[in-house]
Image (tube, helix red, strand yellow):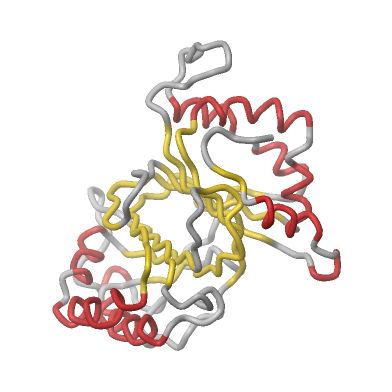
Amino acid sequence: MTPGYGAIDRDYARQLATTHAQDDGPIWMVNLMRYRERARYDDGSDAGRSGREADDAYAPFEILSDIGAEITFVADVEVQALGTGPAWDRIAVVRYPTRRSFIEMQSRPDFTQRHTHKEAGMASTIVMGCTPFTMPDMPDGIAATDWESVPHPPSHDDGPMMVIHVLSFHDPDGAHSTPDHMSAYQQVAAESAAAHGIRIAGWYVVEGTVVGDGRIWHQVRFNEFPSRRAFLAVVNDPRRREAQSTHREVAIADTYTLMTRATRDVRSPGEHLLP
C-alpha cells in the first residue's frame, strides 16, 4: 500500500516487521495530520465529505481494539506556533501492543477497505513510531501544582491546552540523549513553567518515521498547561526567552510547536500519556 499523503520509510517499516518477539513491545504512533478541504475518492467524487469527515469515517476503532491497540489521545491544532511546511489540523496518538501488530494490521482486508477514507481525506501526514523517554530531573512544582492556585487557571473560555513539541536536533544522537544546550534550556524553562502549572503528559523518543517527507525527528514532547494564557505567560518570560536564543535555537535543527485542545484523552486526571 503506497499512500498519497506521504512517503513510506521502507527501512523503518522493515525494522518494525522483523523485530524479534523477545525484543518487541508497545509502540506509540504519533500522527500529525493535515486534511484536504474536500475528500477525494478514486471515482473523483468527495462523497459529500470534507477531508476531516473522511478521516473520521476511516478511524478504525474496532480494528484497533481487535489487535489490542487503542487511540489514546486526539487533539485539534488551535495554533501552530513554530514549524515550516504543512499547517497541521489534528494530532493523534495510537498505542500498539507490539511493532509487529502495527505492520500486520496494514494487510487486514477490513483495514484496507477502511483506509480508502484516509487516502481520500488526508493531504499530508507524519507518522512517528515512538517509545518512552527517560525523564530528566525537573523542579518539584511540575505535575504537583494545584491548577486553581496558579496565575492563569483553567476557565470555561480557556481550558487546558496540550502543547506538543516535535523536535529534530543538530546532534545526530539526539533521540537517545538530549543535547547539552537543550538540557540547559529546559532547566530554565521548567522553572517558569512549573510556576504556571505545567504537567508533563508524556515525552517520547522517535524510533523512526513510518510516513513523512524525508525529515528525521528525534523527540516528541506533550506538555499540558491549565490554559492558553498560562502557556503564553511562560513563552513571554524574559529568562526563558533569553535561554531560547542562547540554548534552544542552538540545539534544534527543525521543530513544530503545536498548541492543541484535546477531543479524546483516555488518561485519568494527571496521568501521563505514557505509563
- The front one of 170 and 33 is 170
Query: In the rendered image, which quarter is residue 42 located in?
Result: top right
**Residue at the image point whose x is 45% and y is 30% from the top:** 52
Residue 78: x percent and y percent? 30, 47
Residue 253: x percent and y percent? 37, 68
Query: Is 169 on the left or on the right of 248, as rendered?
Result: right
Count of all numbered marks drawn on residues in the image: 0
**Residue at the image point whose x is 37% and y is 62% from the top:** 255
Query: In the rendered image, which quarter is residue 194 located in?
Result: bottom left
Residue 98: x percent and y percent? 75, 58
Query: Is 14 on the left or on the right of 88, as rendered?
Result: right
Q: Quick one: quadrant of the C terminus?
A: bottom right
- Determine whether 240 is above or below 60 in the image: below
Q: Is residue 202 visible?
A: no
Q: Quick one: quadrant of the N terminus?
A: top right
- The front one of 131 and 261 is 131
**Residue at the image point whose x is 55% and y is 52% from the top:** 93
Residue 251: x percent and y percent? 36, 77
**Residue at the image point whose x is 47% and y is 85% from the top:** 136
Query: Is 88 on the left or on the right of 99, as rendered?
Result: left
Query: Is 246 on the left or on the right of 23, as rendered?
Result: left
- The front one of 215 and 233 is 215
Q: Is residue 84 visible?
A: yes
- Determine whether 184 is above or below 216 in the image: below
